């Protein structure tokens, strides 16, 4: 087992908090989305769709905060021993998965927002703050976008599974302590 990472090898407390809050929010909204779309049309289903929209907008804001933090606070490099032991394809996968996840953090709520606007169902955040429509009402555009919100959500879910699989490999097989860099607490 590798020694605990030093402070220079760890993510900042803010980065760690944003990571775990966003991770839990994404898992929750994905599960809730699966549940609510399986329900028959009812007042409860309409209420749940509004809650889903509110959660999506909150995730959009959290994603913006996370990317701003990452831009202004360079993440720690992989420990040299870990970086040396990874084949080139793993380096590419490491960066590719992270970049694609960031893209989807924004694409999914924005596609949902555009779909909602095109379908004529405005987003009223928490039932009090109406958000502007991103496009005018267009049944054709709404119909074209409808499946894309789900496709992108499933793509993000697949990337999260890859991310967790890589984490488990590092934790259980390589035993390189990489997870400790993103856990709350002191080094």
Image (cartoon, grey):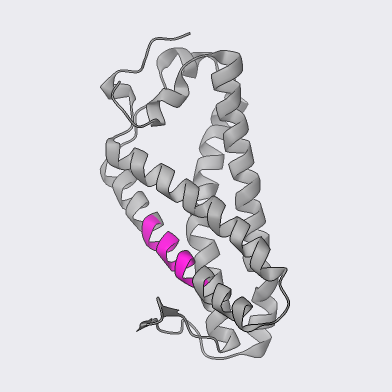
Image quarter hosting the C terminus: top left
Residue at point 52% right, 53% down? 26
x and y percentages locating residue 87 in the rendered image: 59, 20
Give the vertical position of 104 relative to 162 (above or below): below
The reply to whether the magenta stretch includes residue 138 is no
Residue at point 54% right, 33% down? 94
Give the vertical position of 72 relative to 166 (above or below): below
x and y percentages locating residue 21 in the rendered image: 41, 48
Give the vertical position of 31 relative to 55 (above or below): above
Secondary structure that dominates the magenta span: helix
> Is 32 placed left or right of 105 in the picture?
right
Q: Nearer the viewer, residue 6 or 37?
A: 37
Write the start and end of the magenta stretch as one range. 53-62
x and y percentages locating residue 52 in the rendered image: 53, 69
> Is 110 placed left or right of 88 in the picture?
left
Q: Determine which quarter of the picture holds residue 172.
A: top right
Q: Determine which quarter of the picture holds residue 159.
A: top right
The reply to whether the magenta stretch includes residue 59 is yes
> Is 59 placed left or right of 153 in the picture?
left
């Amino acid at each position: 087992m590798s020694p605990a990472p030093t402070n220079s090898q760890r993510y900042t407390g803010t980065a760690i908090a944003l990571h775990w809050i966003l991770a839990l929010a994404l898992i929750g909204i994905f599960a809730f989305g699966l549940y609510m779309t399986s329900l028959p049309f009812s007042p409860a289903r309409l209420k749940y769709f509004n809650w889903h929209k509110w959660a999506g907008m909150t995730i959009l804001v959290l994603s913006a905060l996370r990317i701003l933090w990452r831009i202004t606070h360079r993440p720690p490099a992989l420990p040299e021993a870990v970086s040396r032991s990874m084949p080139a394809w793993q380096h590419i996968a490491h960066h590719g998965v992270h970049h694609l996840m960031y893209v989807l953090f924004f694409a999914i709520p924005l596609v949902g927002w555009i779909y909602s606007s095109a379908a004529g169902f405005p987003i009223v955040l928490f039932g009090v703050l109406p958000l502007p429509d991103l496009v005018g009402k267009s049944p054709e555009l709404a119909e074209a976008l409808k499946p894309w919100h789900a496709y992108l959500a499933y793509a993000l879910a697949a990337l999260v599974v890859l991310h967790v699989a890589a984490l488990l490999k590092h934790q259980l097989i390589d035993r390189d302590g990489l997870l400790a860099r993103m856990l709350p607490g002191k080094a």
